[in-house]
Amino acid sequence: MEESISQDEAMNKLYGQYLVDLVINQDHIAQNFLKFMLTVESALVVAFAFFLRLGPGQISGQELSHLRSLAIWLIPVMGIIVAITLTVIIIYERKFQSLYVDKFNRLPGHCDHVFPKDHPYKSPANKMHLGRVDIAVIVLGILTVLAWGFFLWAVYTG
């Protein structure tokens, strides 16, 4: 009997270490997606500015003039799609991180030792509570979409 208890404790410890590793990996994944979002959005802003600076008289040929017009409309739309898609992905990854934290806290003897328990366990991951970082990512996504919407409006009315 003593041996099975120590085996259970050893398994709980190994499982706890595994869950901590999952939490760390999920954090790295979410950070990398955020870096990717900022990189893509920055590249789209540079491309948009490049096409805006090209005046209609600076481009020779009808095809290039149409390309400029198309790019001025297409780049903001792509920026909106990328911002929405990557924001959803980042939030989903963060919710899985929260799920692993809650699973860790539910292990016997692990509650509040590594991660504070502030929200009850909910499964599946899409029902997890949004934290401050999640809200900041959502605000960043909304501001990015609004900025691209403003650019589209400015091009349309200008």
Image (cartoon, rainbow, N blue to C red):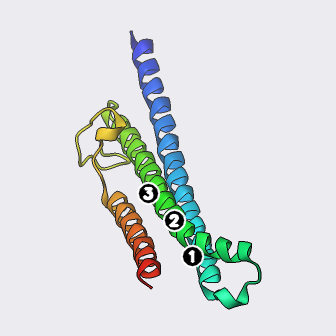
Give the amino acid type for the residue marked by disc 1 in the picture: Val
Q: Quadrant of the C terminus?
A: bottom left
Horizontal side, residue 135 vs residue 68: left or right: left
Give the amino acid type for the residue marked by disc 2 in the picture: Gly
Q: Which residue lies under the disc numbered 1? A: 45
For the residue labelled by badge 3, is the local secondary structure a helix, a strand or a loop?
A: helix
69 or 110: which is nearer to us? 69
Vertical arrangement, residue 155 with respect to residue 74, above or below: below
Disc 3/disc 1 C-alpha distance (Å) = 16 Å
Disc 1/disc 2 C-alpha distance (Å) = 8 Å
Q: Residue furthest right?
A: 60
Give the amino acid type for the residue marked by disc 3 in the picture: Ile
Q: Earlier in the sequence, mark 1 or mark 2?
A: 1
Q: Quadrant of residue 52?
A: bottom right
Residue drawn at x 39%, y 62% as measured from the top left = 137
**Crowdedness of circle 1 by 10 Å Cα count: few (<14), some, many (20+)?**
some
Q: Which residue lies under the disc numbered 2? A: 79
State the mark number for residue 84. Answer: 3
- The answer to whether marks 1 and 2 mark residues whose Cβ atoms lie closer than 8 Å is yes
Disc 2/disc 3 C-alpha distance (Å) = 9 Å
State the mark number for residue 75. Answer: none
Q: Quadrant of the N terminus?
A: top left
**Crowdedness of circle 2 by 10 Å Cα count: few (<14), some, many (20+)?**
many
Residue drawn at x 77%, y 83% as measured from the top left = 60
- The answer to whether marks 3 and 1 mark residues whose Cβ atoms lie closer than 8 Å is no
**Crowdedness of circle 3 by 10 Å Cα count: few (<14), some, many (20+)?**
some
